[in-house]
Image (spheres, rainbow, N blue to C red):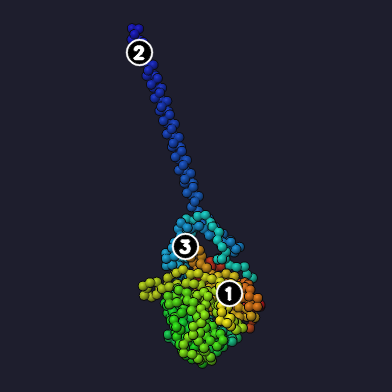
Amino acid sequence: MARIAHKHAASSTHWTVLSTCMGLLGAALLVDFMWASSSSSSSSSSSSSSSSSSAPSATSAYSSLASNWALEKSGIVVFPDLQSRRKSDDQLQEEHVKADHGPGSDAKEKHDQGQDAKGKRDWGRDRFLSATFADLAAPDMKWEEMPPAPVPRLDGAAIQINNLLYAFSGYRTLDYVHSHVDVFNFTSNTWGGRFNTPKDMANSHLGMATDGRYVYIVSGQYGPQCRGPVAHTFILDTETKKWDRMPPLPAPRYAPATQLWRGRLHVMGGGKENRHTPALEHWSIAVKDGKVLEKEWRTEVPIPRGGPHRACVMVDDKLYVIGGQEGDFMAKPGSPIFKCSRRHEVVYSDVYMLDGGMKWKVLPPMPKPNSHIEFSWVVVNNSIVITGGTTEKHPINKRMILVGEVFRFDLDTLKWTVIGKLPYRVKTAIAGFWDGWLYFTSGQRDRGPNNPQPKMVIGDMWRTKLRL
């Protein structure tokens, strides 16, 4: 009995020890499981919080955009860093071409605003850029609205002869171009006297100059969208409204710099047949009283930098070429309507002067790069005054940026100043000056005070007293 009792006690002790060990092991496993579960839950919560903080709300996205424009006014521009979602130029060109080159972009603008409001854009850290795209500081000007032009026009041409301003052709929309001349009388402040242009004369991007009665018209783009230039040239007698022809240019040119100087009509630069390739060639032909004195154009010293959309001004026997750009829209390959397609452009602030020895001199540049100013200038008190234009494209969305300043180039000091602001930013404006008043009309204006992108083609006319 003693042996049986001893065995039973030993067995009981063994099970007690085993049960205790199993209990301790189970408790350890339970604690480990609960710790792991807690850690996973904490990690998931932290990840969710981080994700939430990296995706801004609609309010923060709007505030970011608003603060960018506010900083732009102060001379510092802040843009979101969108490198991870940047599109190539080819992808951007289709969706931006209408916004930059003509009307009809309201739907795209509303779509962009909707995307911002929904907070769908992946905004990253902000980065600071040069203030090239900001409006320059300028004094306010008191502008008075005048009777608008009979039709809106973009990329039209213009000549002032005494108290009459002749506005030629231009786009109404990308798919419609004008083929007539409207005349504004500065004395009566009225429009009238419309007459048609020759059927085979270019409709936009013309080169043009006058001797005070006759207007000399060269090359330009024939038709809507982005058709190429033609080599046709014409002479208009503004007193009789009769047209005559000159020898064609040696090659078609798109928006060439054109001016009368020392009895010769000079044509320089512009774009080549595809609209995009900058041309450096410089030709001239002798003219007098509406007659061409030579049978062929003469080759002259090339312009230092090629491209279209420049101001070309003759003052005191000196020829000035101001601003411009390299590159422009081209026709989309294979498009039966020559649909406009964006290509790389470089806007510059260069200023050149051709002296009596037929040598180009480099003069102080404009306060900022500026283009689309070929008929946006007047000469007042030995100064060249330029209204509006376009500057370098937005570096992120590649949209065109319009100019709203009035610039003065003092030919006595060869210094540039910003003398005022236009009522809005505008490109290819037509400028005139009469009886102390600076006028401008037509072109394509911005989307509003806080958005310098182009929108509406206009015919509005404004004037302000100009005292230099």
- Seen from the viewer's position, the closer of residues 315 and 375 is 315
- Seen from the viewer's position, the closer of residues 112 and 297 is 297
- The kind of residue on which mark 2 rests is His
Q: Earlier in the sequence, mark 3 or mark 2?
A: 2
Residue 368 visible in the snapshot: yes
Q: Quadrant of the C terminus?
A: bottom right
Give the percent coordinates (x, y) of residue 184: 55, 84
SS state under label 3: helix
Residue 190 visible in the snapshot: no
The residue positioned 53% from the left and 75% from the top of the image is 304
408 relative to 395, above or below: below
Q: Please identify, in this view, whether the residue under mark 2 or under mark 1 is nearer the observer.
A: 1
Q: Which residue is mark 2?
A: 8
Q: Which residue is mark 3?
A: 112
Give the percent coordinates (x, y) of residue 295: 46, 90
86 relative to 43, above or below: below
Disc sitting over residue 163 in the figure: none
The residue positioned 47% from the left and 76% from the top of the image is 279
Give the percent coordinates (x, y) of residue 281: 48, 79
Residue 140: image quadrant is bottom right
Give the percent coordinates (x, y) of residue 199: 43, 86
Disc sitting over residue 362 in the figure: 1
SS state under label 1: strand
The residue positioned 41% from the left and 25% from the top of the image is 23
How much space separates mark 1 and mark 3, taking CA atoms? Answer: 42 Å
Q: Earlier in the sequence, mark 1 or mark 3?
A: 3
SS state under label 2: helix
Q: Earlier in the sequence, mark 2 or mark 1?
A: 2
Residue 186: image quadrant is bottom right
Q: How many marks?
A: 3
The residue positioned 56% from the left and 71% from the top of the image is 349
- The kind of residue on which mark 1 rests is Val
